[in-house]
Image (cartoon, rainbow, N blue to C red):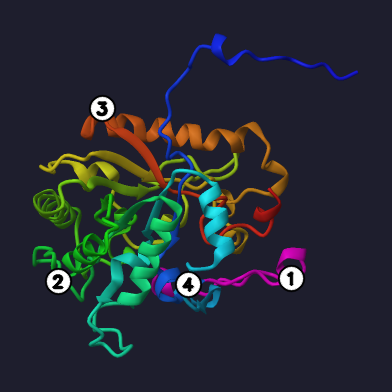
Amino acid sequence: MAEFVTLAPEKLSALREMNPCLMSYNIEFAEVTGGTFWKAYTPEQIAGIEPFQVGKGENITDMYKDLMQVYAPINLYDEKLRKLAKELGTAWVRVSGTWATKTYYDFDGTCNGKVPEGYLNVLTKDQWIGVLDFVKAIGAKLMISVANCPGLHSADQPWHPAEAEKIFALSKEYGVPIDGAEFANEPNMMEETGFPHGYTAADYRRDQDLFFVWLRKNYPDCLCIGPSSVGDGLDFMGSEDSASGGGVEQLTKENVSTEELLKGTKEPLDVFSYHYYNGVSDRLASVMPSAHWAPEKANSEEYLYVPIHCAKVYAPIRDKYAADTEMWVTESGDAGGGGDTWASTY
């Protein structure tokens, strides 16, 4: 027979106080502007009868070109989307991703749809107002990362706020100010994340400081968050018999550690952020089999321990470079590389 237990909340003692924005989510910049992103799985791939082909090339972009498709911008005015988002409660909406590093803000309409040299995508004024309307409608907080690519400056030239000022000013003027900002998405991958050619960890430290100085002077209510790195070459992704850990960052030409990104920086972080994925997706399993989990492992102790282990990796780094700040995971999911075929059933 069923056994019923009655709880008296007033007699319970609190174990921990959590940030009310614990349940938050990311909107890729490519979803706002439209652009390339991971291909939808075919029914045959989901059924396990069609193989995943990963092309070979000089860089990570070449390797993924057969795994990407072009998407139209999402409709952030969709009533069902807004209702479901609002039901999640108080949240941060992070509009970022690798594409954010390479997006030009064409708020005066001078580009006529043509992407300026050195950038990858164009964001229009109407598209960004759509984001601001969405954030306002669901009562969320807004976080972004900014452009830092060859179109803005070269590696030997300091970052400057010409693009950042556009998006921060428009947001403030519209009445939905940006509440938090990371300088860049997953900066540990250097050029592969969109930085100028020849960019180094020293260049990043210089430019993150410049960004935070500018931010605190002009938009002092905005939190300085970072560095939103991933992996660190540490063995915390993949199956328990993995010989080598890490994720998509293993495929990049150059990786630097989180410590290299922060050591010697002068501007303090308000929040320490990092990214974690339990492993890589089905589509990348042939490239990194040791970093891929089979669905039957999804409830195993080893799989469920990954986020705990990852937090233990990053906590000492947070303590060293951003003591007494909150530590946020600003990007995560079921698997790196666009998710698994079985993700929607988990």
Give how far across and how far down residue 47 sits, in percent: 77, 65
| Quadrant showing the N terminus | top right
Amino acid on which disc 3 is placed? Asp
Q: Which residue is mark 4?
A: 63
Amino acid on which disc 1 is placed? Pro
Q: Say if the magenta span includes residue 304.
A: no
Classed neighbour count for the residue bearing mark 3: other residues with Cα under 10 Å, few (<14), some (14–19), many (≥20)? few
Q: Earlier in the sequence, mark 1 or mark 3?
A: 1
Is 43 placed above or below 26 here?
A: below
Quadrant assignment, res 273: top left
What number is the disc on residue 153?
2
Quadrant assignment, res 78: bottom right
Give how far across and how far down residue 163 sits, in percent: 19, 69
Q: Earlier in the sequence, mark 3 or mark 2?
A: 2
Q: Which residue is mark 3?
A: 324
Q: Which residue is mark 1?
A: 43
